[in-house]
Image (tube, helix red, strand yellow):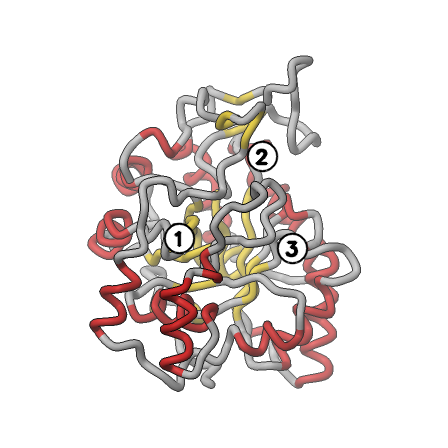
């Protein structure tokens, strides 16, 4: 186990290749899970304002630093700007609110959570009477990113990046903005391996981070009987071959292909297991097998309304092109 295995970002800062995700971590659980993760060797914690738990995440960070003797500069903390805060005037106040909730003076990485904006205001999900979301279609992602650049200038954030952006949207940022996005955080697992987007990001010196790297088996909208990546017979058999769990195989595969991972768990034993990735290597033949898991219907994390993609009508919806 090595807490020091990192990847160098275009900003010059280093990001640990394995972090703890906090999406869907319930109140009353997340502080303990963050504290346990840091005590277990994690140095990268991924969070977001919309998760509604950043105050507890901050408590976990603070407790771990006191109890484990970890310094702030040893940690890498990521957060994300929510969709209703895309207007340039909203960016700095949103960042400062996150810093206040986390109890931090700066973020190591701040991401635009999605490329499309919602109507400005305190409501994270402003809706019309029919349940559809009220969009902000006038604020372009590049304008939001330019406001993010000012956070770097002010020392509030060390690196900035994006999340759920496609290749065309990243290209637009590269063309119009001064700072290269340090990372693009996207859904990425063996059923959706993002091979084309990964190659694109590598070519542009943008680190790809995988959220839901285990296939998000606890996603609330999973249909009964829907295939679970962790239960895939080929994967289970491969785990036996290496003496590792299916989760460890999936995470190690990502790291070997140059993808950073942020698996979520609130279970102490799984938090520890998900970090034990640095004492084995998956063979090229087995990597090829895992690469072959990819499938056309592999995307699992799409906000839905009445069974259809909720935000597909937004002009900046990212999944209308191939990658």
Give the numbered dot on residue 310.
Answer: none
Crowding at dot 3, Cα within 10 Å, few <14 / some 14-19 / many 20+, comes out as: many
Q: Is residue 206 left or right of residue 126?
A: left
Q: Position of residue 46 (x, y in %)?
A: 55, 59
| Image coordinates for residue 241, horizontal then vertical, percent | 36, 80
Between 132 and 146, the one nearer to me in the picture: 132
Residue lying farthest right? 28
Residue 312 in view: yes
Measured Cα–Cα span from mark 2 to mark 1 = 25 Å
Q: Dots 3 and 2: beta carbons under 8 Å?
A: no
Name the residue nearer the viewer: 227 or 312.
227
Which dot, 2 or 1, sits closer to the camera? 1
User: What residue is disc 3 on?
Assistant: 99
Which residue is found at the position 55% from the left and 75% from the top? Answer: 42
Between disc 1 and disc 3, the foreground one is 1
The answer to which of marks 3 and 2 sits earlier in the sequence is 2
> Which residue is located at x 29 percent, y 32 percent?
321
Q: Is residue 86 above or below residue 69?
A: above
Between 192 and 124, the residue placed more toward the observer is: 192
Disc 2 marks which residue?
A: 85
Query: N-terminal of the two: label 1 or label 3?
Result: 3
**Left or right position of 158 against 258:** right
Q: Earlier in the sequence, mark 2 or mark 1?
A: 2
Residue indicated by mark 1: 188
């Amino acid at each position: 186990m090595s807490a020091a295995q990192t990847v160098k970002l275009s900003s010059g800062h280093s990001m640990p290749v394995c972090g703890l995700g906090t999406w869907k971590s319930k109140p009353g659980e997340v502080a303990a899970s963050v504290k346990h993760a840091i005590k277990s060797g994690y140095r990268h914690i991924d969070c977001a304002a919309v998760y509604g738990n950043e105050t507890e995440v901050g408590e976990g960070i603070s407790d771990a630093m006191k109890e484990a003797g970890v310094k702030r500069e040893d940690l890498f903390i990521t957060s994300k700007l929510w969709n209703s805060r895309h207007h340039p005037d909203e960016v700095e106040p949103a960042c400062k609110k996150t810093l206040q909730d986390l109890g931090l003076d700066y973020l190591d990485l701040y991401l635009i959570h999605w490329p499309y904006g919602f109507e400005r205001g305190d409501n994270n999900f402003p809706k019309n009477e029919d349940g559809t979301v009220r969009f902000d279609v006038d604020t372009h992602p590049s304008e939001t990113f330019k406001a993010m650049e000012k956070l770097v200038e002010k020392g509030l954030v060390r690196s900035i990046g994006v999340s759920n952006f496609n290749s065309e949207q990243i290209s637009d940022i590269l063309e119009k903005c001064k700072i290269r996005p340090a990372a693009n955080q996207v859904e990425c697992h063996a059923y959706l391996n993002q091979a084309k987007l990964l190659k694109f990001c590598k070519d542009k010196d943008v680190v790809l981070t995988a959220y839901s790297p285990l296939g998000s088996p606890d996603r609330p909208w999973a249909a009964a009987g829907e295939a679970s990546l962790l239960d895939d017979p080929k994967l289970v058999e491969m785990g036996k071959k290496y003496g590792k769990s299916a989760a460890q195989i999936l995470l190690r595969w990502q790291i070997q292909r140059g993808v950073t991972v942020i698996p979520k768990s609130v279970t102490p034993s799984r938090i520890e297991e998900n970090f034990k990735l640095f004492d084995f290597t998956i063979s090229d033949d087995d990597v090829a097998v895992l690469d072959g898991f990819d499938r056309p219907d592999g995307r699992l994390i799409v906000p839905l309304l009445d069974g259809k993609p909720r935000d597909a009508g937004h002009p900046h919806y990212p999944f209308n092109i191939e990658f």
